[in-house]
Image (spheres, rainbow, N blue to C red):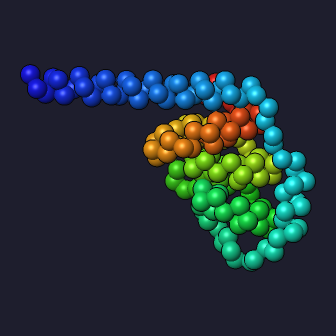
Amino acid sequence: MRPRRARNKLRKRLQFMRNALALAAAVAYASAMSRCDVPEPSLVATQAAQSVCAPGSIATGENFVRAAGHGRIKDVVNAISAGQDVDYLTHPKNDSALMAAAYFGRVEVVKVLLAAGADASIMDVHQADALHHAIVGPRWLGHNASGHAAATIARLLIASGCNMTS
């Protein structure tokens, strides 16, 4: 009888987690209706012109995606000004810099990437886009304080034309 109770308890916990995820998605969608400030594309050019681009600081696209996930905005701007493809996909997961920044709640990096023309509708190997990463990331990592960042990023992505049906 005990294994059955344990299974039932696990099922209840999984259902609770599914409901919490659905609620987070609903909150992000509802908050998307409020005002959304996306920086002008000229902001990226201005920041790139003001910063010194250190050659070799971002050697590969993999490091570019890693810098976006870590929130190193100066490295991201330098890489973009040096000609880095903002839609570079990592191997083998096909993660983009926008997905990494959204997953870890890096609002300012998301703004810069969107202003530079990053495509918010790109899917990874699990058919998840940047909006999915923004909603799931803070919950999966256990960051309760990142809910505001996730909602802000969701608004930015939806305003930039992220596909809500996928």
Labels in figure, total = 0
Asked whether the viewer can see residue 129, the reply is no
Q: Position of residue 59 (x, y in %)?
A: 66, 72
Q: Nearer the viewer, residue 151 or 69?
A: 151
Q: Position of residue 106 (x, y in %)?
A: 64, 51
Q: Position of residue 7 (x, y in %)?
A: 21, 26
Extreme residue toward the left, this view: 1
Residue at screen point 11% across, 26% down: 2
- The quarter of the picture where the C terminus appears is top right
82 relative to 145 in the view: left or right: right
Quadrant for residue 163, please give it. Answer: top right
Q: Nearer the viewer, residue 66 or 22?
A: 22
Decide: is 83 above or below 141.
below
Residue at screen point 84% across, 65% down: 48
Extreme residue toward the front, this view: 145
Quadrant for residue 81, please give it. Answer: bottom right
Decide: is 26 above or below 79.
above
4 relative to 136 in the view: left or right: left
- The quarter of the picture where the N terminus appears is top left
Residue at screen point 64% across, 36% down: 151
Extreme residue toward the bottom, this view: 55
Q: Position of residue 90 (x, y in %)?
A: 58, 56
Decide: is 98 above or below 136.
below
Residue at screen point 84% across, 47% down: 39
Asked whether the viewer can see residue 163, the reply is yes
Q: Nearer the viewer, residue 129 or 13?
A: 13
Decide: is 165 above or below 127.
above
